Image (cartoon, rainbow, N blue to C red):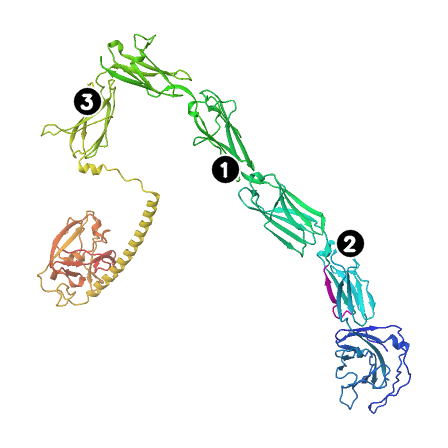
Amino acid sequence: MKILEKRIPTNNCKKKKKKKKKYSYLSSSFSLSFFPFHSSSFSFSFSPIPSGSQLDDMEEVQVVVGFNASLPCSIRAPDHDAPTLTLWYIADGEAPVYSYDERPGYHKGSQWADTDVFGSRAFYSAHSIPPALVLAQATVEDARLYRCRVDFQNTRSRVAWVNLTVIVPPRRTQLMVLNSPVNLGDRNDVICKAFGGSPPPQVVWMQRGSVVDSSYTHTGDETYNVLEVEATRDDLTHPFFCKATNNDRIGPDTVHHERNVTCGPLSVTISGEEEPIAEGRSSTLTCTVIGSNPPALVTWYQQGQMIKPLHTVVRERDNVTTSVLTLNASRSDHMRQLVCRAVNALLPEETLEDILTLDVQYKPIVTMSLGRSLEPDNLREGNDIFFDCKVDANPDPYKVEWWHDTDLVTQDLAEGVIVGDSTLALQHVSRNKSGSYQCRASNVEGDTTSDPIQISIKYAPRCAVSPSLRGVGLQEPINVTCEVDADPPDVTFTWTFNNSVRREQSEIVDGKRYTTEKLRSVLFYTPRSERDYGTLLCHAHNSVGQQTTPCSFTVISAGPPEEVTGCVVDNVTSHTCSVVCNPGFNGGLPQSFMLEVWLLDPVKSQQIVLNYTLPQPVFSVRSLSPGQHYRVHVTAVNGRGAAPAAVLEIHTLKEAEMHKSLPSRSEPSPLMLVLAVIGGALLVVIMLLVGVWAVRGRRRHAHAQREALQIPMKESNPDILEAAPPPTSPGHTINISVIKHPHELDVDTSPTHDLALDPLGAARGHRNNGTSQKTAFGVSEPLHRPIEKSLQTPVCHPYDDDPASSPEVTERTQLTASSIDPSLGVTLSVDAASRSRRVMYSRTPLHDELDIGVSSCIRQPLMRGSSESVM
């Protein structure tokens, strides 16, 4: 019998073939209770004890207690035959415990089970491949050897053997810790025990997903495994798992164990923030200790002194201890060592520490000094001066600047200024180098300026007043003041006199004739004769030296000043003007300038209108009258008299001339031009809209006039006349303005056509044997020609649409209303106030429809508002 290879296992069952497994049973005979069979005869053979060949085909099925067991009946029906009855037996049992009946005549597919054996848990799956007996929620008692017999219609019965094994998992698993904590390298510190289980379970130790110890022992109802793996640091972060299992259908019973291994710290590291440590700013430092169990005790030290940390955090899972320190460092802490020390209390010999050398950044400390060989109190003009600038900064300064008072000092070799990184050299100094000097250094932490050093350059006296010219008369005393600038101010004065007679040798003035006070000396001088006029020289000297150039005062005989020159009158308006002159020599005495303004009146005598004096010849003249003639006198005056006057004349503007002489407006700005363009564009748009509206209004007005031709005049309004019949009253006179042009037009002399107009102005052509004469406008046309004849003679010219735009000659013709042919369609309008009337018509070229060879020009009622006035 061939067993099908394909199997469909039920939940958590395991089927396995056993090869050459022998069974022994107690008896070889048994009695069989037969069920009623179909009438057709068949034969079968049954042996309660499996033979050796049958043992080779026996199916092994394993199931975990409580799960469904599927017992396959691996019997294949012969060709052209079908099973009729399937019976299940327990090993060599005589009576079946389950049947599945497929015989004809019976209820096909009926099932029967021995309730004492299976209860209601058995079900036969006849259509699975192979067919199988399913036992729900298998129990320990279901573990037996089963026999399946299948009866066929035409073929003898066949038997299959199935051995069911029911697996019972272990009841529980527990750990027994023998030693904790353990040192590195220790073993056999924990036992894992599994209780119960059939078959006995396997008990193994696993770490990181791999089996590390599989040596277990089975004793009675217990199975145990002692952990023989040496303790390492990895055990602190990677726990052990003990797994007990005896099947592969359900997961193993697992317990985990975290080994407590005592070990010292592996590493100690001090780390800081991204920002550097800076003076005046709090910094946070972190000390991280890895690998110590139990957690290490972390302490901080600086210069041998313990520092209390801000807080300490322990992460036991990662076996990491973190200590945070807040440090307020100063510049004195720069380059000092900071120590973080980690100590395991159980292993004090394995202490570790980390040392951090502090890099503290701080603003520059600037110290400025004068050169060593220089004496601050003896700095003179012409000497060389040096300054040193010492800078203590971290990081180094990126620039060093020198300041003199409030000015930045830059290198200028031509002036003897040499600027270095830490030195400043001033060569051949002059007194303007005196003042306050400072050095300023800058780094990323800020700027610092040194204390100022005040230096004073000593120099010989120098004249503080300009050379002057003094005019004085004989026997007239004057005081001559000499002032000098010197450092130090211990000045001694000496006065000398020189004139043209004593050119080679000066006369020393007696010290009794002048006084001295600090940097000032006053000389009392009186010229006794003409020889006393000359030059007075003031000499001063101090501890530095003699004054190089003495102060000079020239004494001359005093006289009147010179006349002013170059006088100019400017900015003349109707009421004001300005007068500017150049002063002359003052005659040796202070001078002033007098302005006189005289009004020149041809009727009255001259009269002065303004008179005032100024220290300079620059005058702004006001309060003048418009359109007047003035004479101006400018005179220089001093204590000795007056100079000849400079005479000027002024013609003030009239009011009208003043408006014309106003300055023109300035050129418009680009913004004004843009606004003007935009305004112009808007104006054009508005004009176009108004034009369109006006054209439409004219069309409506012309249409109303055409309709008015057919409406009879109402009695209530005598100003509106009927178009036909013509009025009989000749009492109203019509004034017609006949427009004649200076140019001539040739009129065809061929026979003309009489044109008649219907009431609507339609042209009618009638042949006429009369002739027309060649007429020139303004020459041969009668002035009192009847209007109907005048209108019948067509006259076309380019100014018909706009008579006002051409040269014209206007003549008046008086007509009565009765003299107008009503067929011409001429509308008479009568002004209500003046009772004057207007003939409204238009001139339109029209080609004759009745073989007229030339164009005719007829007057029609106004269509677009163009009209010819009849006064």
Labelled disc at residue 185? 2
At 16% across and 53% down in the image, what residue appears?
738
Residue 753 quadrant: bottom left
- Of the 4 image quadrants, the one containing the N terminus is bottom right
Question: Mark 3: which amino acid?
Answer: Ala
* Nearer the camera: disc 3 or disc 1: 1
| Foreground residue among 510 and 89 | 510
Residue 125 quadrant: bottom right
* Nearer the camera: disc 2 or disc 3: 2
Mark closer to the chain start, 2 or 3: 2
Residue 587 placement, left or right of 817: right
Please provide percent x and percent y for residue 352. Answer: 69, 46
Mark closer to the chain start, 1 or 2: 2
Q: Which residue is mark 1?
A: 447
At 34% across and 8% down in the image, what residue appears?
505
At 30% across and 7% down in the image, what residue appears?
501
* Residue 782 in sight: no
Please provide percent x and percent y for residue 552. Answer: 32, 16
Residue 178 placement, left or right of 383: right
Q: Which residue is mark 3?
A: 645
Question: Mark 1: which amino acid?
Answer: Asp
Is 640 contained in the magenta span? Answer: no
Please provide percent x and percent y for residue 401. Answer: 49, 32
Q: CA distance from mark 1 to mark 2?
A: 62 Å
